[in-house]
Image: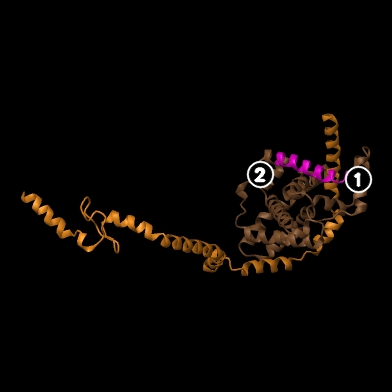
Amino acid sequence: MGEAANKLCVAEIASLSAGDEELVQAAREGDDAAFEMIFERHRLRIARITSRFFNRQEKIEEVVQEVFAKVYFALGDYSRQRGSSFAAWLTKVAINSCYDELRRARRRPENNFSSVTEDETLFLNTRLKDENAADAEATTISRDLASKLLARLDADDRLILTLLDGEEMPAAEIARALGWGVSRVKVRAHRARAALRRVLGEFL
Amino acid sequence: MFWKNRKEDERLDLFGREITRRATMSDEEIEAISSQIRYAGIRARIRAKQSEPTDGWIATLLVARQAIPLMALVAMVAAFWMWIASSGANVSGSIDDALTGTRGAGVERVRAGGTCAISASDECAISTEDVLATLVKESEK
């Protein structure tokens, strides 16, 4: 997602925010149709965020449902006085839900062995040893292989790298979304990059 | 050496960034998945959460149930220590007797320095009356 897409995302949030407050108020008062409207307005964006962390359709659906269920019960906590729009608050809930699910997935032993096939190992080895290949030919990496490599990272590392490089969010925005300090985000990003280098180093 | 390592790290970082970008779906795929998510599924999830017993005394009972193994362990440790303490009561009991002035079974006071110095028989025992009589005699003198 490039700069243009990122700007589009910000514009999208701004346009969605108009009218959200009324819907939130109505949903808080028990209007189910208003909550359904909130879901219809935001589900694509939440699905997009979720798809950055998970690549199985069922998992994305499950996490999106969980996000909206959490939002339903937390509507009372949302307050515009906090200075953030509903869309930004929803994004925060979605990111934190993805983070929780990543941590849960890491604890399940069956998810810790995302085995890289022999062909993929050979492919990585060739690409990583070729000093000229990293830039141009890396684009041939399949999504499946990329997911397997990222699955080897800790939840924190994966979260940070996904938000920084996948979503191209600035450190300050990540800090706001996660409730962390900016310096913590930067330190974590530094460690995450080192961790990914170690993962790649296994194939050299 | 340092320069070479740094260059290598930068190359791996570049590769890593590409991997992170590659691990995502296309917009079309995301839209397709998003359109399949039904509000009914969310309503069902909300209903399931609402029916979970998370309020009042039921929640307290659930928490208490989780504490049962810990409480059982604490009770076992306490019982063990009580058993240890009771087996050592004979030793500590004599100390208590000495402090409180009570006599233990078969233990009698003896007159120090006399024939009864190392005796524990009845004839050598000193009673409260003996002590009182001695004190009265001393005062009469």
Kindly report the distance in space between the C-alpha atoms of the residues bearing marks 2 and 1: 36 Å
Is B91 left or right of A139, judged from the image as shown? left
Task: From this view, report whether residue A51 is shown above or below residue B47.
Answer: above
Segment tinted magenta in the rendering: A185-204
Specify few, some or many for label 1: CA neighbours under 10 Å numbering under 14, 14-19, or 20 or more. Answer: some
Residue A168 position (above or below residue B121): above
Q: Residue at x 42, y 60 (%)?
A: B85
Q: Secondary structure at mark 2?
A: loop
> Which residue occupies 92% across, 40% down?
A129
Percent from the top left, x then y, of residue B140? 5, 51
Label 2 sits on what residue type? Trp
Per the image, the residue denoted by label 1 is A125
Q: Which chain is orange?
A: B
| Letter of the chain in brown | A
Number of callouts: 2
Q: Which one is earlier in the sequence, the residue at label 2 or at label 1? A: 1
Give the residue type that dot 1 points to.
Asn
Q: Nearer the viewer, residue B79 or A70?
A: B79
- Which is nearer the eye, A78 or A30? A78
Pick the front one: A120 or B100: B100
Quarter of the image for residue A196 reads: top right
**Which quadrant of the figure has residue B59?**
bottom right
What residue sits right under mark 2 in the picture?
Answer: A180
Work out whether disc 2 and disc 1 sit on a shared chain.
yes
